[in-house]
Amino acid sequence: MAETRPDGLEGDGAARMNGAESLVRTLVGGGVEVCFANPGTSEMHFVAALDRVDGMRCVLCLFEGGATGAADGYARMADKPASTLLHLGPGLGNGLANLHNARRARSPVVNIVGEHATYHRAFDAPLTSDIEAIAGAVSAWVRTSPDSRQVAQDGAAAVAAARTAPGQVATLILPADTAWGEGGPVAPVPAAPARAQVDDSRIAAAAAALRSGQPAVLFLGGRAVREEGLRLADRIAAKTGVRLLAQVSNARMERGAGRVPIERLPYPVDQALAALAGTRHLIIVGTTVPVAFFAYPGKPSLLAPADCETSILAEPAEDQLDALRRLADELGADAPSARPALARPVPPTTGGLVPDTIARTLGALLPEGAIVCDESVSTGRTFFPMTQAAAPHDWLQLSGGSIGLGIPMATGAAIACPDRKVVNLQADGSGLYTAQSLWTQARENLDVLTLIWANRSYAILRAELAHVGANPGRKALDMLSLDNPPVDWVALARGYGVEARRVSDLGDFVTVLRAALARKGPFLVEVAL
């Protein structure tokens, strides 16, 4: 006798499922185990399917930018995609900024967006929009499922697209009737294709440039700035004297005591030009040609010297580790001698609560295995060199430049790695874009420490006014101030369910940071600068 299921279908028990359930089962079978969701009416059958499918953790986010940013942070640490669940075109629009950051970080994300039922779209209901056009700006793959029996196959294709090197945003648009209609069988997800190996000619060209004796830079990003890539690059540097330099913003760097130290190209254009001055050979691995973030009057967009010969050793989608290994072998570069141990800094006791003392404190106290999610913006420009001798850790940055990633990224990283401490270095202005993600940290009891650099301004934009040659007056400066009224981050955090403290001197900062790192669960420290 046929039974009536919770989704309204009648059938023979488990033999029948709707399109949404076939999709969720396909995602779980393909290794997608977390969904960061902010659903609406059109997505209710997907939400209901979560009750019937084991293996999918659903994380509620109060804002779509929190969901997409968390999916980015998760992917960076898990090296596999999570899914999102967003409500129609406006919900996708709310999540677009952090999907941009995910695209720039080359993070694999399965971005699921609900849509009106196929027959309803013709009536131009208030929430109707061109979802494919909106998604196309940040997605390498976009598809709208045409009927419920194809949803599982489309889901499998989305997972495969997201996992395609170097990692992509794949957007699957799910009309409501394809979710509630009778689904097809669960679809297998094909294995991700191996990264392509680079041609021998590129290895030979790079080796020739490094043998020339002229000043050279190995410009690294992607997998090349993780531990194995840096060890290989270090072999090459020890043999040839080439300078190692990382791109400005990196999705994930593995660094700290015992790992190969590397500088990053500075963000300010004048400093970047100075860092590359005199370079005759720029060899790029896992990233792209260095360019200025913005155009400035009288300054170049390309940052390498005009007489520098630039070559690509390995594209972001190619096998960067294999290319570095083959280049090292071509050069006869053996493993260098063991590096002398770097002395871990001790917490400072003088100097006031300023960026340099904050950086030294972080270098002294970061626990082994910490995941640092860095959206410090202007406050944190000195943090990087002063944390090189900290305990081994991962450092995640704002890869796409669209602020509002830090708190969500930390949320996703903590879900990917529940046994590791996550430390979010967060500018106050950009933190306000997605402060709602603190609620998700409390709801999920995530082990995240958020450090708010409370200078009560958009400090980086004050500097940019000078860089672009503007002559600001009172109105312009008021647009960059967050001090009227001041934001109370302690009250804000507590309102979201996160315990918080405010510190205003160096001694209190060191004491509170020690205690916060020793405890479990979400905690926020507002650091008054």
Image (spheres, rainbow, N blue to C red):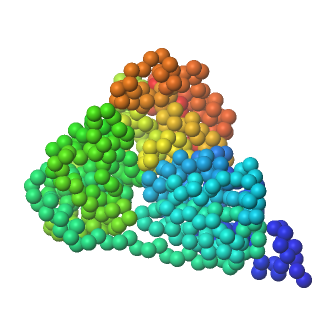
21 and 353: which is toward the camera = 21
Q: Is residue 513 left or right of residue 351?
A: right
x and y percent of residue 63 in the render?
64, 45
Task: Locate residue 111, reporting x and y percent.
Answer: 59, 59
318 displayed left or right of 44: left
- Whether residue 73 appears in this view of the structure is no
Instruction: Tell me residue 387's x, y (percent).
Output: 35, 42
The N terminus sits in image quarter: bottom right
- Residue positioned 73% across, 59% down in the render: 121
Q: Tell me which residue sits at (51%, 24%) in the image.
A: 479
Residue drawn at x 62%, y 75% is: 153
Q: Which quadrant holds residue 55?
A: bottom right
Relative to 508, does residue 310 appear above or below in the rendering? below
Q: Quick check: 32 above or below 475?
A: below
Q: Residue at x 59, y 59 (%)?
A: 132
Residue nearest the observer in this picture, 315 or 524: 315
In the rendered image, the residue lying farthest to the bottom is 1
Q: Closest to the observer: 363 or 159?
A: 159
Q: Is residue 19 left or right of 346 when viewed as pictured?
A: right
